[in-house]
Amino acid sequence: MEGVSSNRKFDKEQRKNRVSIMLNDSEMRALNRFCDHYTVKNRSRLIRETLMRAILKRFDKDNPTLFD
């Protein structure tokens, strides 16, 4: 994804684990439409970065704070 700053630690590590997902027809159409509209060249990278962003955001939200 162009214009998205990525975490260099993740980029330098070799990816050796495979994850497979299934999409229904409407989800696939939405993904294709997004990729066409924003000229996404690397769909795998888009999905990986989107997933990791959501996971890290949840970790940050669930992290206890000093005044909780």
Image: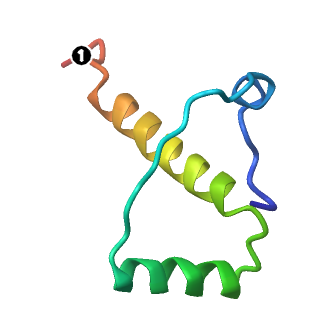
Looking at the image, residue 24 sits to the left or right of residue 42; the answer is left
Residue 5: image location, x then y, percent: 76, 46
Q: Quarter of the image holding residue 32?
A: bottom right
Looking at numbered disc 1 in the image, what kind of residue is underneath it? Phe
Q: Above or below — where is 40 with respect to 34?
A: above
Looking at the image, residue 33 sits to the left or right of residue 60; the answer is right
Residue 38: image location, x then y, percent: 71, 80
Instruction: Classify the position of the N terminus by image quarter.
Output: bottom right
**Residue sitting at x 24%, y 16%:** 67
Q: Nearer the viewer, residue 46 or 6?
A: 46
Q: Above or below — where is 13 with respect to 51?
A: above
Q: Residue furthest left?
A: 68
Near mark 1 (Cα within 10 A), the count class, few <14, some 14-19 or many ≥20, is few
State the SS at label 1: loop
**Residue sitting at x 45%, y 79%:** 28
Circle 1 residue: 67
**Residue sitting at x 71%, y 33%:** 7
Q: Nearer the viewer, residue 60 or 23?
A: 23
Q: Residue furthest top?
A: 66
**Residue sitting at x 37%, y 69%:** 23
Instruction: Classify the position of the C terminus by image quarter.
Output: top left
Q: Nearer the viewer, residue 61 or 9?
A: 9
